[in-house]
Image: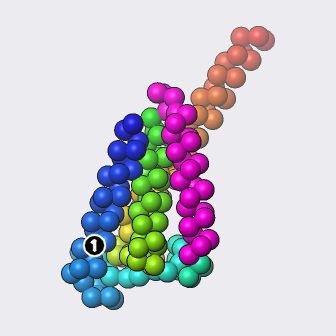
Amino acid sequence: MVYYLLAFVVILLDQWTKWLVVRYMELGESIPIIENVLYMTSHRNRGAAWGMLQGQFWLFYIVTVVVVVGIVIYIQRLQPTQRLFGVALGLMLGGALGNFIDRVFRKEVVDFIHAYIFSYSFPIFNVADAALTIGVALMFIYTWIEEKQRKGMSDGANSTHN
């Protein structure tokens, strides 16, 4: 299915960019892409987002396996009309597996995208994190659209009976 292909592309891009960072940058090195906005900064994370739960590998392994199994089950049950939801799931699957690969083989996650939003230094992240975030956002958008359509249908059904 196309959603597994999307996940595979996310994993390839994630692992390739992390390999480049590990291979060609010193830990802590920062290269400006857009001054005061976007930097490529070599960073390692042994925890979850924003450095939480440092070193809790077994927790991450268990959670990732459960999440991946759940995503695969949802992908298998998708209807042809649920393309946006499928894209969301594909991005989330690729992102989850991209960071899982790091945790299994490196015992840490390679992060390198460092953005400043106005003067706020956003926590450094990677392609897998971006895919997960975009996937979750798309899932919320899909859910919102579906809910609006359901309400619209039920409102239309109610107005015909009055």
* Residue under the image location 35 percent in, 55 percent down: 10
Vertical arrangement, residue 159 with respect to residue 31, above or below:
above
Q: Is residue 7 left or right of residue 24?
A: right
* Residue type indicated by callout 1: Trp
Image x and y of residue 76, in percent: 52, 36
Vertical arrangement, residue 96 with respect to residue 122, above or below:
above
- Visible in this render: residue 118? no
Q: Residues within 10 Å of mark 1 (few under 14, many from 20)?
A: few
Per the rendered image, the range of residues in magenta is: 57-82
- Residue 75 belongs to magenta span: yes
Point out the image quarter for the N terminus.
Answer: top left
Magenta stretch, main secondary structure, is helix
Looking at the rendered structure, the secondary structure element under dot 1 is helix
Is 103 or 9 nearer to us in this picture? 103
Instruction: Residue under label 1, please give it.
Output: 19
Q: Is residue 80 left or right of residue 110?
A: right
Q: Is residue 134 left or right of residue 159?
A: left
